[in-house]
Image (cartoon, helix red, strand yellow):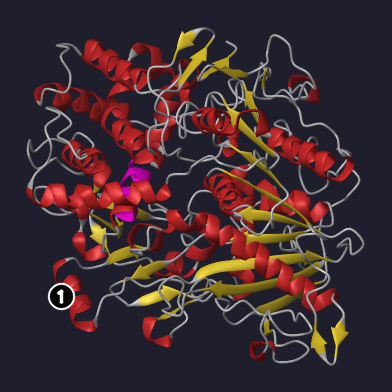
Amino acid sequence: MRLLLTGMVVLLSACNSNDIFDSNTRPAWLGKVSQNNLDGVSNDLLTAGLGKSGLALALPAHADPAKPTPAELRRAAIYNNYRALVDISSSGGYGRLYGPNIDISGNDTLGEGKIAGEEYLAYADDGTGRQNVTLMVQIPANFNQSKPCVVTATSSGSRGIYGAVSAAGEWGLKHGCAVAYTDKGTGIGLHDLSSDTVNLIDGTRANRSFGGGNFDAGLSSSELADFNAQFPNRIASKHAHSQQNPEKDWGRDTLRAVEFAFWLLNEKYASTQVGIRKADYATPATVTVIAASASNGGGAALAAAEQDSRGLIDGVAVSEPQVQPASVAGLSILQGGNRMPAIGSPLINYFTLANLYQPCAVQSARLSGANSAFGTVVSPLLGSARCASLAAKGFLNGSTLEAQANEAYNKLISAGWLVESDALHASQYGLSATPGLALAYVNAYGRFSVKDNICGYSYAYTNTTGDVMAPISNNLAGIFGTGNGVPPPAGISIINNLSPGGAKADAMSLSASSNTADYNLDGAICLRKLATGVNPLTGAALSGNEKLQADRVAIGIKEAQRNARLNGKPTIIVAGRADALIPVNHAARAYYALNQAQEGSGSKLRYIEVTNGQHFDAFLALSGFPTRFIPLHVYAGRALDAMWAHLNNGTALPDSQVVRTTPRTSATDNLNASALPAFAAVPTSDAIRFSNATLAIPQ
C-alpha cells in the first residue's frame, strides 16, 4: 500500500466546515490513510484476485508463513470472511444463485467477478490510540459518478474489516457504489502477551513498542511482567479486553465510515475553488446511502440509522441483526396465536442461559440426532456430565439423563428459543459459538481487563491434551487472515485457569467445585451471575465483588441497547425463523415490535421472516444442514434490491411477512430458485401484523 497524502489537493487540516468555500474537511478523528489501487486482474476489491473459482478452492499458501505479506494477509482475510458468511457449494447456490459471477439481474454474466478499483484504509480514534476503529472505503472503477451511492458493510460478528465483504460489500460493488466498511472496534486485534506483539492495521504483526497497533491490552511493563509470570503464554482479544465496550459505538462507527466515504468521494470528484477542494459532490442530498450488513453488522446499521441526525442514511437493509431493544415492557409476540414466553432479552442474558443448558439439552432424544448428524460436536460424555452436575447443584430436578436433558431443553424453549431451531443447539455450543460469545460479551460489557481473568477464564494456544502452550508462530502471524475476532479462532482456546491440576482448555478442563469434567459448569454459572446480577439457582441478589462486577456488566448492557426509533427511515429487516444464535424473539421480532409501538403509522420498517433460515449459511456445507435449512444470504440480497428500487424508483416496500422456503431433499441436490420464493408485494395469510401492543406472526 502507498500512503494517501493528507490533503490530496491541499492541506485540508487548515480548513474547517465554516470556510467560505465550504471545503471538504478531513474528519478530525481520521488517522493516516493508505490507498491501494487494484487492477481487477491480479488483484481486486471483492475476491483479492482469487475470482469466483479461487474462492471455492483451497487458499494459496503464504510464501513465508512466518512472515506473510500485507497482500497475502488481505487475500486470506477476504477468502475466509467471504466463505464464512455464505454456502460456498454449487449445490447450495454458489455460482448459480449468488456469487461473484452473478450480475445484479441474477444472471451468470460476470465471469470470475473480479472488480477493479481503489481501496482506502484508516483508523478512527479519539486521539488516545485506545479506540483505533478500522475504517475502509472501496470505490469501484465502475463507480456511478452521475448517480453516486454508498453501501455500508460493517463487519458481522467480531470479524475484521473484511467481515462483511460477501454480506453487503459484494452487492454494493456490483451496483457501482462505494462501500464503507468498519470493524466497529472489534476486529482482529490480538495481543500476544508473552512476546508483546500486536496486529497492525494491515494485518502484519509487530512489537507493541512499534506503535500503530489495532489493539493492545493497556498493561504497563511491570503489569505485563507480573501477568506473564502468573499466566504465561496468554492472549488478549480486542472485543473482550479493549475496555471500550465497543458495541455502544457501533452506530457511531458506521456513520463515520459513511463520512469517510463522503470525504474521499469529494476528494476524488468535487470541484475546486481557489485551490481548495469543495464538498459539493458527496452530500446527503446527492448520494444515496444504504446501511446494510448481517448479524452484528446489521445491528450496527440499525444503530446508525437511529443516531443519524444529519440525514446521511437514506435506507436500511439488514439480515439477522444482533440488535437489543431497550425495553419491550407491555409488548407481546404471538406465533400462530401462541404467546411467546420470553421476548427482547439482552444478548448476554440468553447467551449465558444457553451456555448453562445447551450441552445438557443436546442429550435429549429429540436433539441428539442432530448432534450426531453434524459430527457429534457436543461430547455425549461431557454433555451427560453437565446434566448430572446441573442436577447435583439443584438446577435440574430429573433423576435420569433423559429427564434432565428434556428439562434443560424446556428451559431453552421457555427462554424464547423456537422449536424451529432445535437442530442447531448442538452446533451452536459444540462449535464454540455459545461459550466463546458468552465469555467475550461479559468481558466487553463489564469493560474488564485481561488481567481480571473474569470467572477464571483466559485465552491461549493449547496442545492436544488441552495444556497451555506457547503461541504457534505461523498461526499467530497469519491470524489477520484466519481469525474471526472472538477466540477460539485459529488454534486459540478458551482456558479454564481454575481447573484442578492446572490450567486447561475449557472443554477439556474440570470444574473446581466438583472435580468433574462437565464443560466447566463452574465457569458457566459464574458468567450467568455476572450477566443477570443474581444467583441463577436461588434468584438472590449478588453481593461483594460479584455484585460490583455484575453492576459493571449491567451498565455495559444498557449502553448497547437501542431505542428502535428510526424516524420514518425506510428499513427492511430479514431474519431466519430458525436462528438459534440470535433468536428472533429477542432481536428482530422484538425490535420490530418496539418500533411499531413507538412510530406507529409513521414507521417505514418492514420485517421479513424466512422459514428454514438460520444464522450461519457457511454451515450449509456441513452434514445435516442442507436438508434442513436454506441460504438466508439470498434474502439479504433481495432486501437490498427492494430498498434500492424503493429509493431510486419509488417502488413500494414489501409488506412485513413470512416467506416460506423449501430445503433440499438431499445434500447433493441443486437448490433451485423455486425453493426460495420472492417477497410478496401484498401478503395475505402470511402477513405479519402489529396492533394493540401485540406482534402477530403467522405460524
Please state the horizontal and vertical placement of residue 26, each as a whole percent of the image.
66, 80
> Toward which corner of the image does residue 283 lie, by quadrant?
bottom right
Q: Report which residue position mark 1 lands on.
A: 226
> Toward which corner of the image does residue 49 lie, by quadrant?
bottom right
Does residue 53 show up? Answer: no
Does residue 407 show up? Answer: yes
Of the pair 192 and 141, the residue shown nearer to us: 141
Quadrant of the frame with the C terminus: top right
Residue stretch in magenta: 435-444
Check the image and report above or below for 204 versus 483: below
Q: Residues within 10 Å of mark 1 (few under 14, many from 20)?
A: few
- Residue at disc 1, secondary structure: helix
- Residue 97 left/right relative to 587: right
Check the image and report above or below for 572 versus 483: above
Check the image and report above or below for 102 versus 11: above
Check the image and report above or below for 135 versus 463: below
> Toward which corner of the image does residue 396 lie, by quadrant?
top left
Residue plotted at (47% across, 58% down): 249
Residue plotted at (59% across, 82% down): 32
Which amino acid, by three-letter code, is at mark 1? Asp
Please state the horizontal and vertical placement of residue 272, each as a whole percent of the image.
86, 84
- Residue 285 left/right relative to 211: right
Q: Is residue 436 magenta?
A: yes
Magenta span main SS: helix
Of the pair 13 and 210, the residue shown nearer to us: 13
Please state the horizontal and vertical placement of residue 645, each as a whole percent of the image.
84, 40
